[in-house]
Image (tube, helix red, strand yellow):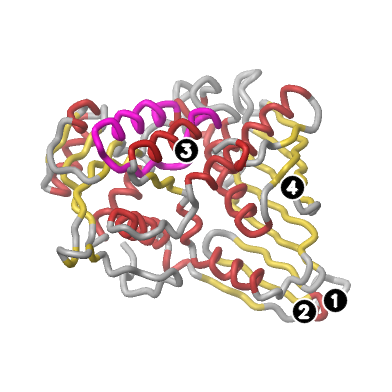
Amino acid sequence: MTNKTLSDPEPKTGLRTPDSGPRTFKIAIVGLGGHGGSIQRSAEACDAIEVAIVCDTNREEVEKSVRRFNCAGVTDYAEVLRFDGLDAVVLVTPNHLHLEQTLAAFDRGLNVFVEKPIANNVDDGVAMLQAARDAGLKFVVGHNMRYSRAYWRMRELVSEGKLGDIISTEIHFSADNTRWMPKSAWRLRPDLCPLLPVMQLGIHGIDLVQSLIGPIDEVTAMAGSYTTEPGVIDGLVAAVRFANGRLGTIVSNYCTQVAFDFRLSGTEGTIFSTPHRGWFRKSTDTTSQCEGPKERFDFRAYDGESYLLQMEAFAEVLAGSRFSGASAEDAISALAVVEALHQSVEAGRPVRVAPVREMV
């Protein structure tokens, strides 16, 4: 996995409860294939987590994970909810299942970690957050890129004022998913995954840029179908305006090679970054040919670290600490932008994004 001695800039509680000292929390992992593999690796490497039961509709995936963790395994989520001694469930399931599965877990008194996006629509996300509050349970959403070292470096440069007044942002989050996904995959079905690439990929960039710049309050989007059936959107380009008046762009598609790229441009400098590497250049050092000294940062050696640190942070939450990543409110705010983008595509006009404070 990753080097677990790496320093985390967020404060740690030591995973101690007031009376019992160090704790190990028993979890269920629900959804084992695909991205579930990343979550399994992070749970395996986290000392504060014990995987007590796994669940997937694919029996072969269950059997592999049972051997891996020496734990119980089931193919029916209802059996997970009947399992004794759990502290939390970790849901790595299709978006359209998040609401029902999360509410069922809260009904059983279980804390919940759910992979991003929080849900397929804002109303569901709000209902999930309200249910967590009503039950007095922990609720964490897995926007793992908040734990990447490249993001931390971007955050440091912004907070130190190295960019000056940030004027514009650019994000491009894409992957050639239609090349290898079967047409029946839920990620290619608009009824199960609205605005396909933005919901699965672009939402990462939306979350990160809002955490750095502030909320987006208006979007204007255009979209098309290029490698999918007519009417199934697999490419989008949008202009956005932030509440502070700054401007940005979003590009997200399922048609081209993987690109998880950021650019923040300010009066004093520019940052370009991917999840693991990038550079910062001062405006005073930049020539008319876009050349000049620049700071490079490369954290590719820590690939996968963000998932481990996120899992450790979830364990901290179970121990009573505040979550240091994207909050459920942040996740709903990012989803609200995706929803507004979808509305803009359908209406052919700019759409305002409802502020999260008016929703939760």
Label 3 environment density (alpha carbons within 10 Å; few <14, some 14–19, many ≥20): many
Is residue 254 in view from this perspective? no
Q: Is residue 290 left or right of residue 130?
A: right
Mark 1 surroundings: few (<14), some (14-19) or many (≥20) residues within 10 A: few
Q: Secondary structure at mark 2?
A: loop
How far is the residue under mark 2 from the one under mark 3? 42 Å
Query: Residue sitting at 38 percent across and 39 percent down?
Result: 132
Please give the label number shown on residue 274: none
Circle nearer the N terminus (2, 3): 3
**Residue bearing the label numbered 4:** 249
Is residue 88 located in the magenta-colored stretch of the structure? no
The alpha-carbon separation of the residues under discs 1 and 2 comes to 6 Å
Give yes or no for contact between labels 2 and 4 (Cβ–Cβ under 8 Å).
Answer: no
Badge 2 or badge 4: first in the primary sequence: 4
Residue 310 position within the rendered picture, expressed as x and y whole percent measured from the top left = 39, 57
> Which label's residue is closer to the chain start, 4 or 1?
4
Q: Nearer the viewer, residue 248 or 297?
A: 248
The location of residue 131, given as percent across then percent down, is 39, 34
Q: Are marks 3 and 4 in contact (CB under 8 Å)?
A: no
Residue at 71% x, 53% y is: 170
Find disc 1 in the rendering and name its residue: 287
**Residue identifier under label 3:** 118
Mark 1–mark 3 Cα distance, whole angstroms, equals 44 Å
The boundaries of the magenta stretch are 96-124
Q: Give whichever of 245, 169 is nearer the camera.
A: 245
Q: Which residue is mark 2?
A: 292
- Left or right of 285? Residue 89 is left
Question: Where, by quadrant of the figure, is residue 13 drawn?
Answer: bottom left
- The three-letter amino acid code for the residue at tag 2 is Gly
Looking at the rendered structure, the number of numbered marks drawn on it comes to 4
* Amino acid at dot 3: Ile
Disc 1 + disc 2, Cβ < 8 Å: yes
